[in-house]
Image: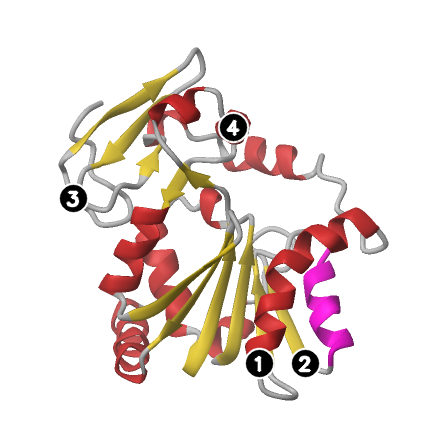
Amino acid sequence: MPNTPCPLCLGTETARFFADKQRDYLRCRHCQLVFVPPPWHLSAEAEQAVYDLHQNRLDDAGYRQFLSRLAEPLLERLPASANGLDYGCGPGPLLARMFNEHGHVMRVFDPIYANRPDTLQNRYDFVTCTEVVEHFRQPRREFQRLFGLLKPKGHLGIMTKLVLDADAFSRWHYKNDPTHIGFYSADTMAWLAESYRCRLEFIGKDVIIFTPSDAAIGNFIGYQHRSGCK
């Protein structure tokens, strides 16, 4: 399905990047997003069935250590008693608890496990999004929403594994999860930072922090009102 529009930048210069027995994967030549075309997306019911298999318990020390890769660098950047939102928290919102333990006030949102639209009416000092962006069916809309949730000088912290090249992708376990439909490279993150006028920081192999300018935040808020994002 070459020339399928990119769901992130809406560009039509897309070409096959890889194919396996399960799916095709296209890459956008503009923003470099690698994505699975809609015919290979799971139904909402099948997608939730996969999520329900996850065992992310609040008392899981290994899971806490995993989340600390995002939590620790964000904690270094936050003012005291900051307000945060964990977007896509899943059934076990351990990350929110970790920030609570450091004196920050957290709210959670997840379209399946914590569908609380009122949380999307506020603005926050920081928003976290761990192992979530690879599931976005409409990443353009989702990123507009995420940036629009930030206060001036706020931080958007993302955790997702990054595409390296086609050879590495062919052997990459990350693509084998049927709920993973969008794969970001460092170039894609740079495109996001430039498009949305953000400072971009890469921390380790899979943690990315965006800090938009004040002017950019104003634009995102305007977008939310015009598009009716909730």
**How far apart, in angstroms, are the residues tagged by discs 2 and 3?**
39 Å
Check whether the beta carbons of the residues at disc 4 and disc 3 lie within 8 A of each other: no
User: Of label 2 and label 3, which has the lower sequence position?
Assistant: 3
User: Of label 2 and label 1, which has the lower sequence position?
Assistant: 1
Residue 39 appearing in the image: yes
Mark 2 lies on a secondary structure that is loop
Q: Which residue is mark 3?
A: 11
Relative placement, left or right, of 145 versus 8 is right
Q: Which residue is mark 4?
A: 178
User: Of label 4 and label 3, which has the lower sequence position?
Assistant: 3
**How far apart, in angstroms, are the residues tagged by discs 4 and 1?**
35 Å
Q: Amino acid at mark 4?
A: Pro
Picture disc at residue 78: 1
Check whether the beta carbons of the residues at disc 2 and disc 1 lie within 8 A of each other: yes
Q: Residue, x 26% and y 33% (percent of image)?
A: 27
Q: Residues within 10 Å of mark 3 (few under 14, many from 20)?
A: some
Q: Residue, x 14% and y 38% (percent of image)?
A: 12
Q: Which residue is mark 2?
A: 104
